[in-house]
Image (cartoon, grey):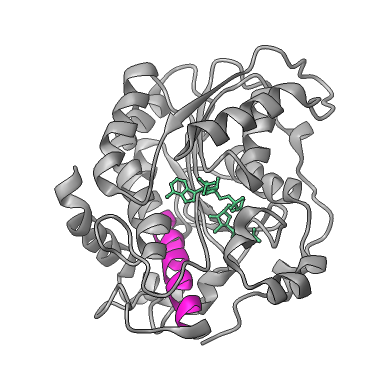
Amino acid sequence: MSSTITWRESFPPKPAFTEKDIPDQYGRVFIITGGSSGCGYEVAKAVFNLNGHVYIAGRSAEKAQAAIGKIKAEPAASHPTVRSGKGKIDFLQLDLNDLASIRASAATFLSRESRLDVIWHNAGIGGAPQGSTTTQGFETHLGVNALGPFLFQHFLTPLCVETAARSDAPRNGTRVIWVTSSGHRGAPGPDGVNWDDINMHSVGGLKGGMLKYGQSKAMNVMYAHEFARRFGSQGLVSLSLHPGSVKSEFQRNQPKLFRAITSPLLYDQHFGGLTELFAGFNQEVDTSTVYAGGNNGRYIEPWGRWGVESQAVVDGLQKRGTGERLWELSASLVKYYI
Ligand SMILES: NC(=O)c1ccc[n+]([C@@H]2O[C@H](COP(=O)([O-])OP(=O)(O)OC[C@H]3O[C@@H](n4cnc5c(N)ncnc54)[C@H](OP(=O)(O)O)[C@@H]3O)[C@@H](O)[C@H]2O)c1
């Protein structure tokens, strides 16, 4: 197993890209999954204050409404040109733990909106207990971090394509963002996916946890590449990112002692939000893929810089066609819920 984090990812320089670099978003529509806390909360707050219409997609209406209330009450970050006040923010019910519920979540969104400019597949979990499964019996990290977002995106892609074709859509502005982790570097070899036993139910302990989380996050990296390859020609940009090591509710499943030791090394969640905002709004990307010399499909590191994915995952994508293989496998695993 390789190191799960690089020096560059652990100690990033000050952010070069902030809310101030993003123009007014009035008229555009966004989804941030898991926007009730952590990095997602920061994204929701920024987009709302930039006058976008943002949906916080999550499993708890109560928690989302509390976050929405807080976002509306907090002051906006200062901005040289944007005057806040026209933003909208709503809750969308979404439980990634239950594939059978995802179609209805997407249908609710599609019944309300006629465009989707940027979606951040940000919701995720780490440290799920050994043996835990989703409603459909998939290993929890696999189900919540990878298969759930894959299925949710399946229902939304046609609207993303339509949005990119609109005359009022900013060029290269319609984006699908897959929030991964530096932990993807700890995924099983050689490709990042344990093809023969994708649930890895029998692998326990700390190592098992890292392999399962790592695999789910390697899948996010691979989805970003494969999505760019499939939909770049239809105007969509797809990127993955490691938000940074930030203090959020993400640490809730970690043992107390581990949390006490690592806590001083964590950054404020606002920085993780900036990484995600860079992915959603930077002007350095077009729709041509890395294989054609572009940035579409690439990986972003904290706090908004182009990074380099695990070499094993890249080799799999480039030499062994693992992007397509994972796509087909994921599609077959979720097909009963389409
Ligand atoms: N924090 C870090 O250091 C770090 C490092 C690397 C990568 N990441 C990644 O960054 C992303 C955001 O994490 P964060 O740090 O902001 O943690 P967070 O505060 O725990 O946020 C994660 C969000 O995901 C939601 N979520 C979890 N399970 C869900 C489900 N079944 N259906 C729908 N929503 C669900 C949570 O909602 P509930 O409250 O309902 O559970 C929560 O709002 C995650 O994908 C994580 O893997 C974080």
Q: Percent position (x, y) of residue 57?
A: 47, 36
Q: Is residue 8 magenta?
A: no
* Residue 267 is at least partly visible in this image: yes
Residue at 35%, 59% in the rendered image: 143
Q: Is residue 223 magenta?
A: yes
Percent across and percent down for residue 96 are: 38, 48
Residue at the left extreme?
336
Residue 207: horizontal and vertical position, in percent? 50, 85
Magenta segment's dominant SS is: helix
Among all residues in the image, which is located at the extreme bottom?
1
- Measuring from the top left, give residue 2's x and y in whole percent: 55, 85
**Nearest to the observer: residue 178 or residue 224:** 178
Relative placement, left or right, of 245 versus 106 is right
The quarter of the image holding the C terminus is top left
Q: Looking at the image, which is closer to me, 200 or 156?
A: 200
Q: Find residue 103 and report its image quarter.
A: top left
Magenta segment boundaries in residue numbering: 208-224
Question: Residue at the spot x=75%, y=50% of the render?
Answer: 271
* Residue 330 to residue 87: above or below: below
- Say above or below: 68 vs 275: above
Q: Nearer the viewer, residue 279 or 109?
A: 109
Residue 282 makes an appearance in the image: no
Quadrant of res 194: bottom left
How many labels, in total? Answer: 0
Q: Residue at x 29, y 42 (%)?
A: 154
Q: Residue at x 60, y 45 (%)?
A: 279
